[in-house]
Structure formats: structure tokens, C-alpha cells
Image: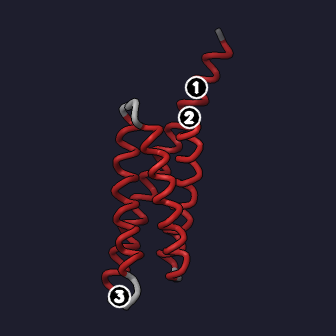
Amino acid sequence: MPGQSQQASQANQRLEECIRLCLDCLKLCQQCATYCIQVEEKGRAKCIQLCLDCAGVCAVTAELMSRNSTFHAQACGLCADICAACAAECDQIGGDIARQCTEACRRCAESCRQMAAA
């Protein structure tokens, strides 16, 4: 059935895109956390913690999606929540790396919400 084949292909493309966005977010969260540690300014502890939490959940979520785990939708829901929290915190920090992290978190959160709902 051609319709089912096309739907499966689209679902696979969405899955691959979500994995890519999780990995991009993981990288930028690690960079942002490292930057916040290096500048040693007060008030960055929450940002560092959220960036590390976000990087960790993005890694696990990408892994679960990569192997088509039955738990990947649940992981995507959690990932979306943590990414949204991280984006909100990094948005307050300012600077180029925090802006990049905020944008990556927002993209990942949106994609993960869609995957969790699928």
C-alpha cells in the first residue's frame, strides 16, 4: 500500500530529525554549561544544572529513538519539558552561546513534543 509506505517514510524522517535536534541540543547545552563554569559569575548555577540535565536527557532520548525503544515517546515528553526549562533559563543569561543554546533547546522541545504525541 503506497499510502502506508509514504506515512512510514514521513514518520522515519520526523524521527531522524528529532534525533538530530536532540544531538544538536546536547552539544550546545554542554558548551553553554562549560562557558558558564568558565566565566565564574554568580547566578549561573541554575543555568549550569539545567544545561547538564538537558544534555543528559537529550543523549538518552536520542539513544532510545535510535533503537526504536518502546519508551522513546515517554523520553521525548520528559526531554521536551527539560529543554523548555533550559531554554527559559539560558534566555535570561544572554550572550552568543546562551542564545544558541536557547534556540537549540526550543527546537528540540518542539520536535520532542511532536514525537511524544505521535
Q: Which mark is residue 39?
A: 3
The crowd level at tag 2 (other Cα within 10 Å; few <14, some 14-19, many 20+) is few
What residue appears at the point 37 percent right and 53 percent down from the top-left corner? 57
Q: Please state which amino acid type lies under the numbered disc 3.
A: Val
Residue at numbered disc 2: 13
Are the residues flagged by discs 2 and 1 in contact, CB closer than 8 Å? yes
The crowd level at tag 1 (other Cα within 10 Å; few <14, some 14-19, many 20+) is few
Q: CA distance from mark 2 to mark 1?
A: 6 Å
Residue at numbered disc 1: 9
Q: CA distance from mark 1 to mark 3?
A: 45 Å
Q: CA distance from mark 3 to mark 2?
A: 39 Å
Q: Tag 3, which secondary structure?
A: helix
**Of pointers 3 and 2, the one earlier in the residue sequence:** 2
Q: Tag 1, which secondary structure?
A: helix
Q: Is residue 16 left or right of residue 36?
A: right
Q: Is residue 107 above or below residue 69?
A: below
Q: Position of residue 58 (x, y in %)?
A: 40, 52
Q: Position of residue 47 (x, y in %)?
A: 41, 75
Are the residues flagged by discs 1 and 3 in contact, CB closer than 8 Å? no
Q: Which mark is residue 54?
A: none
Q: Point out the image quarter for the N terminus.
A: top right
Q: Point out the image quarter for the C terminus.
A: top right
**Of pointers 1 and 3, the one earlier in the residue sequence:** 1
Name the residue at the top extreme: 1
Are the residues flagged by discs 3 and 2 in contact, CB closer than 8 Å? no
The crowd level at tag 3 (other Cα within 10 Å; few <14, some 14-19, many 20+) is few
> Is residue 88 or residue 17 the one in the foreground?
88
Q: Please state which amino acid type lies under the numbered disc 1.
A: Ser
What residue appears at the point 40 percent right and 44 percent down from the top-left corner? 62
Q: Please state which amino acid type lies under the numbered disc 2.
A: Gln
Q: Position of residue 99 (x, y in %)?
A: 54, 74
What residue appears at the point 58 percent right and 25 percent down from the top-left corner? 9
